[in-house]
């Protein structure tokens, strides 16, 4: 799957520390850490080795970056 035009959003941590992950508005699941985000992207057809979750571009991190996990 090409990443051009994809919109990946990781929502802020919820009350349990999980972060909902969406691609183009479709919920992929709730991640409990960065590895979960990469796994969801892999299941959506993206190559995790080609995705840079910590860099600018593909993933929009809401309510804190990729280091923000834990209950709010």
Image (cartoon, grey):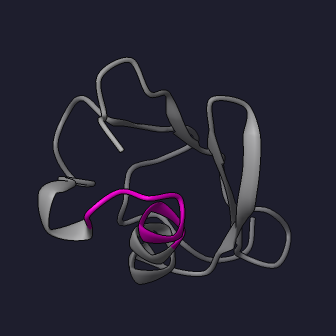
* Camera-side residue of 14 and 59: 59
Q: Which residues are magenta?
A: 40-47
Image location of residue 31, percent across then percent down: 62, 73
Residue 43 lies in magenta, yes or no?
yes
Image location of residue 39, percent across then percent down: 46, 77
Residue 19 vs residue 66: left or right?
right
Q: Residue furthest top?
A: 5
Image quadrant where one finds the N terminus: top left
Residue 40 vs residue 12: left or right?
left
Image quadrant where one finds the C terminus: bottom right
* Camera-side residue of 43 and 32: 43
What residue is at 26 percent from the left and 68 percent from the top? Answer: 48
Image location of residue 65, percent across then percent down: 39, 50
State whether residue 57 is above or below residue 21. Answer: above
What residue is at 61 percent from the left and 81 percent from the top? Answer: 32
- Residue 19 sits in quarter: bottom right
* Camera-side residue of 54 and 3: 3
What residue is at 14 percent from the left and 57 percent from the top? Answer: 50
Residue 36 vs residue 3: left or right?
right
Q: How many marks?
A: 0
What residue is at 85 percent from the left and 69 percent from the top? Answer: 15
Image location of residue 58, percent across then percent down: 31, 35
Q: Residue furthest right?
A: 15
Residue 2 lies in magenta, yes or no?
no
């Amino acid at each position: 799957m090409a990443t051009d035009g994809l919109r990946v959003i990781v929502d802020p941590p919820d009350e349990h520390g999980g972060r909902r992950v969406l691609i183009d508005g479709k919920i992929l699941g709730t991640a409990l850490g960065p590895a979960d985000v990469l796994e969801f992207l892999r299941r959506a057809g993206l190559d995790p080795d080609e995705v840079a979750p910590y860099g600018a571009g593909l993933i929009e991190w809401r309510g804190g970056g990729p280091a923000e996990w834990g209950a709010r």
